[in-house]
Amino acid sequence: MPQNFTELSEQILKNFLAMNPSVARYYSGLHEYDGIVPDFSRKSIENYLSTARQQLADLDKLDRAALSDQEKFDVDLLRHNLAAGSFDLADLRHWETSPLFYVGGLTLFSYLSRNYAPLEKRVAALTEQQKQIPGFLKVARENLKPPFARPLLEVSIMALQGEIRLRQTDVEAVTRSPELSAELQRESAQANRAAIAAIQELVDYLKEQQAHAHDDFALGRENYEKLLRYGELIDMPLEDVLAAGERNLQENFVAINALAKEIDPNASLGEIKARFDKQHPTAEDLIPYTQGLLENIREYLIARDLITIPNENRATVAPTPASQRWSFASMAPAGPFEKSNESFYFVTPPEDNWTPERAEDWLTVFNYGNLEDISIHEVYPGHFVHFQHIHQAPSRVTKVLLMSSPCHFEGWAHYAEQMMLEQGYGNNDPAIRMAQLTWALVRNCRYIASLKMHTQAMCVDEATRLFMDYAGLAEGPARAEALRGTFDPGYFSYTLGKLMFLKLRDDLRARDGEKFSLKAFHDACVSNGAPPLPLLRKKLLGENAGALL
C-alpha cells in the first residue's frame, strides 16, 4: 500500500489513464499513451474494479489532518472518480450493453490534427494503435450482449462508419505522405486496411442486430439516482431535481414568447425564428466569419473584465473532420500537458455535393444569432477558456481528471451563454437573445426528457412532443433529441450544471455583499479543473455549503 498521498494519487491516476488512453492523449495531451488501446477484456475490467475498491480503502486510511487543503480537495476528486468509474463498469455495464463504449478506443484525431511531434513519429504511433484494433474489436464482440436498444444501435453504426470514413480519407492520405519512410508507408497502409475491415465487420454485425433491437432503454429510478450520486455527487430526491428543471423551462418559455411579441406582435414565434434562420454567412464565408467573430467576443470579455484570459493563444476555426460531421460545431482544445498549443473550433459547412436547397437548410443553424451563442459556449468564455485555465490548474490530479463532471464542463459553457447577455453582450440584439433562449429551451427539454423517460415511463413519442412544444423543434430534430435521451441520460448536464452555477453565484454574492467579484467567481469556476459542483461549492463556501439548487 502507498504510504503517502503523492504515491497513492499517482497510482490511481496511472490506473485510470491505462483504462482511458484516448482521454489521456486527446483531452490531457499525455502522449506517452500514444499507440495504446485499452484492455477491456472481462478479466481486465474485473481487475480494475478490484483495484478501485482497494484504492478507495487506501484513500480512507490517509491522515486527512496531515494533508494540505489542495490535497484534501484532490482526495475527494479521486474518490469521486473511482466511485463513478466503478458504477459505470459494475452497475451500468456499458461494456456489455453499448457498442458506443468501444468507439473511444478507435479514435485517431490527436495524431492527425496537432503537430506535437514530427509526422513520422505521430504516424508510427497511429499505426501501432491501428494494428491493435482487430483484437480490440474481437474483445468487444466477446463482451457485448445483444439484443441492444434500437437508438443506440443506430448511433453506434453511424459513429463506426465515421471512423471508417476517417481512415478512407485522412488516414489513407497521410500514409502516402512523402515525409514518411517507404517502410512506414507500407506498414501504415496495411494496418489501415486491416482496421477498416475489422470496423466494417462490427458494423455488419450491428446491422444484423437491428432486427432484434428493443425499446427497453430506461435506467429506472434506482440507477438514475446512482447516476446523479456517483456521477455528480448529487444526493437529492428526484422530484426536487425535476421541479428545478421544470421551473427553468417555464421561465425560459415565458421569456422567449415575450421576446417574440416584442420583436413583432403580429407574427408567431415560428415565423420570427424563420426570419432569423435566413440571415447567415454563406458556405464560403462561414469559416472566416466565425474566426472574426471569436475576436469580437474575446475583446468584449477583456473590456468588461469578466474573466481572466490566461494567454494570447487562439482557437483556429476549421471545417469539422469527416468522422465527426454529425456535429454542427465542437471544440477540440489543447490539453494541459499538450506539447502543441493548437486548439480547433470545428464548424461543419455544407458538403460540396449537396443541392443548394439542402445546403441552405443546413446553414440555417448558423444564423448570426446562433453562431454567436454557439461560439460563446464552445470558445469564449466556454470550453476553450475553461481549458486554458485547466492548463494552470493547481495540481496534477485536477489536470488529469479534467472531465470528471459533465455538469461542470457543459454547465459552465451553458451558463456562459446566459451570463454574457446578462452582462450586455450583443447590445440587446434580438437575434442573439432568441438564439440563447432557444438553446436554453432545448437543454431544458433534454433535462426533463431524461428524467421522465428513465424514471417515469415517458415514451419517445411523448419526449418528441416535449421538444416540439417547448423548444420549437420540427418533428425530425425533436425525435432525434428524444432518441438521444434513451442512450445518453446524462444530457441533463447542460441545464443542471447551469442551475448549480447560478445558485453558487447567488450564494457567494449573498455572503460577500459588495466584496463579491464576478470575475473572481468566474476564475474560480474554471481554475480547478472540472470537479463535481458540490466539491467546488465546498471549496468556495466551506463545509456548510448549503443547497445545490
Image: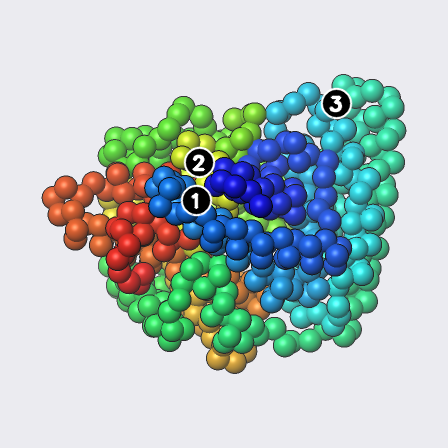
Q: Where is residue 172 in the image (x, y as percent from the top left)?
A: 79, 34
Residue plotted at (53% across, 71% down)? 223
Marked residue nearer the N-terminal end (3 or 2): 3
Query: Residue tagged by mark 2?
Result: 395
- Quarter of the image for residue 181 reads top right
Element at label 1: helix
Marked residue nearer the N-terminal end (1 or 3): 1
**Residue 120 badge:** 3
Cα gap from disc 3 to disc 2, whole angstroms: 33 Å
Mark 3, other Cα within 10 Å: few <14 / some 14–19 / many ≥20: some
Quadrant, the C terminus = bottom left
Which residue occupies the foreground of this view, 384 or 228? 228
With respect to residue 96, does 159 lie above or below? above
Check whether the beta carbons of the residues at disc 3 and disc 2 lie within 8 A of each other.
no
Residue plotted at (63% across, 77% down)? 216
Which residue occupies the foreground of this view, 87 or 454? 87
Inspect the image, locate mark 3, and give the three-letter code of the amino acid beneath it.
Glu
**Residue 49, visible in the rendered structure:** yes
Query: Residue tagged by mark 1?
Result: 74
Q: For the view shown, which residue lies furthest in the bottom direction?
A: 457
Element at label 2: loop
Cα gap from disc 1 to disc 2, whole angstroms: 8 Å
Marked residue nearer the N-terminal end (1 or 2): 1
Check whether the beta carbons of the residues at disc 1 and disc 2 lie within 8 A of each other.
yes
Inspect the image, locate mark 1, and give the three-letter code of the amino acid beneath it.
Asp
**Residue 429, visible in the rendered structure:** no
